[in-house]
Amino acid sequence: MPAATQPLGEFLRARRLRLDPATFGFQTGRRRTPGLRREEVAQLANISPTWYTWLEQGRGGAPSREVLNRIANGLRLTTPEREHLFILAFGHLPDTPLSISADITPRLQRLLDALPMPALIKTITRDVIAWNRSAARILTDYAQLPLAERNVLRRLFTDPQVRGAQGDWEAVARLVVNAFRADVARAGNSAEIANLIAELSRQSPEFDAWWRSNDVATHTEGVKRIRHARLGAIDLEFSSFAVEGRPDLNMMIFNPANEESRRKVAAD
């Protein structure tokens, strides 16, 4: 068995054995070992069971990138695990578009809920997928919106009420577009991203013009002024944080920027 291929096979085997067959729809009765069988991984990855067995055993040569991606998807590897898999196989990180998912862990939601200030989590496509109670009160109660309307870009460019609630809509919207462009370059091409860009370009002349301008910016921190329907003007400092192991997600935390805003947020 070639020594260079042992770590790859050992890693695949370790990931396979930790998985619950029931979550994949496989029968769980009378198994001699925990986890998925090799033929089940091969089925999930749409490859030959013999070839997958050889791969775990360090035989048959290195897989292609396409096959390794299929195996990673079949094993439901996290982003760090997928990167480690590619490093073991090829010596470098995968050169593939980011996978965008609306799933978060219960622990991450509990973290949001524990924060006293507004906080939310959004994807690269600017879909808000999680938020806390304070965000629902001060920013938007996303639970009351259909899934398609929980998108920051759609709301900024197609909802007159959201536009009117911004202290400086043009500055905010332009910055969001420019930061979105930077994230799109990092994420790679996908049908979901392309469809969103085409949709917004049709519906908003401003988005179309700013997208064509090719300006790029970051959106990691700043001050956001909103006109709250009941509380009036509120200034919020925001900071953005990457979610470890989930490069498709970003957490935003909003803190009152001055004493007046702090009193309004605390009184609500």
Image (cartoon, rainbow, N blue to C red):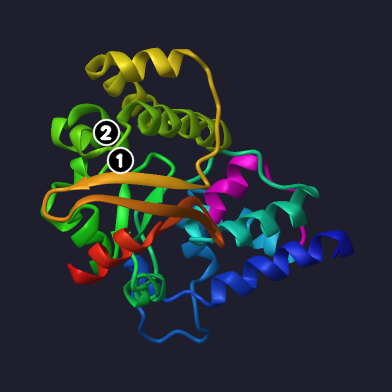
Res 16 → quadrant: bottom right
At 48% from the left and 74% from the top, the residue drawn is 19
Q: Is residue 70 magenta?
A: yes
- Start-end of magenta stretch: 58-72
Where residue 221 appears, x then y in whole percent? 51, 48
At 78% from the left and 66% from the top, the residue drawn is 7
Q: Is residue 229 above or below residue 204?
A: below
Q: How many marks?
A: 2
Res 114 → quadrant: bottom left
Specify the amino acid type for callout 2.
Leu
Position of 56 compared to 160: left or right? right
The answer to whether residue 60 is visible is no
Q: Is residue 32 above or below residue 49?
A: below
Question: Disc number at residue 156?
Answer: 2
Secondary-structure class at tag 2: helix
At 39% from the left and 59% from the top, the residue drawn is 258
* Residue at numbered disc 1: 152
